[in-house]
Image (cartoon, grey):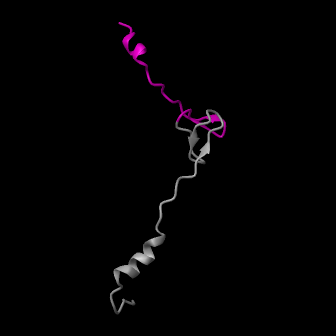
């Protein structure tokens, strides 16, 4: 197996790594609720995928609903 004969300098190493960039996620709009979501994923807001309800999303209780708990 081949091994390097000489050490690569840090500038040469950094030139090679200059193209390691993070790209922004490609987002699409949910057809149901129009919120941004990743393509080919279930919408985190409404739980729809391909116009079919896949998961049920729990709604957050407001402060009024928290105070009116049945006894």
The dominant secondary structure in magenta is loop
Judge whether residue 61 is colored magenta. Answer: yes
The furthest residue to the top: 71
The furthest residue to the left: 7
The percent coordinates of residue 62 (x first, y second) are 43, 19
Q: Is residue 39 above or below residue 53?
A: below
Quarter the C terminus occupies? top left
Residue beneath the point at 42% across and 14% down: 65
Residue beneath the point at 53% across and 30% down: 56
Query: Quadrant of residue 70 in the image?
Result: top left
Judge whether residue 59 is colored magenta. Answer: yes
Q: Is residue 68 above or below residue 23?
A: above
Query: Quadrant of residue 64 in the image?
Result: top left
Q: How many marks?
A: 0
Residue beneath the point at 56% across and 32% down: 46
Residue beneath the point at 47% across and 64% down: 21
Q: Is residue 29 above or below residue 2?
A: above
Q: Using the image as rendered, state which of residue 31 and residue 19 is in the foreground.
A: 19
The percent coordinates of residue 16 (x first, y second) are 44, 77
The percent coordinates of residue 47 (x first, y second) are 56, 34
Quarter the N terminus occupies? bottom left
Image position of 23 (left or right of 28): left
- Magenta part of the protein: which range? 45-71
The percent coordinates of residue 28 (x first, y second) are 61, 45
């Amino acid at each position: 197996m081949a091994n390097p004969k000489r050490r690569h300098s840090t500038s040469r190493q950094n030139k090679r790594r200059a193209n390691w960039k993070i790209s922004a996620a490609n987002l699409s709009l949910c057809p149901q609720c129009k919120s941004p979501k990743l393509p080919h994923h279930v919408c985190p807001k409404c739980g729809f995928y391909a116009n079919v309800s896949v998961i049920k999303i729990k709604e957050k209780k407001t402060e009024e609903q928290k105070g009116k708990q049945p006894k």
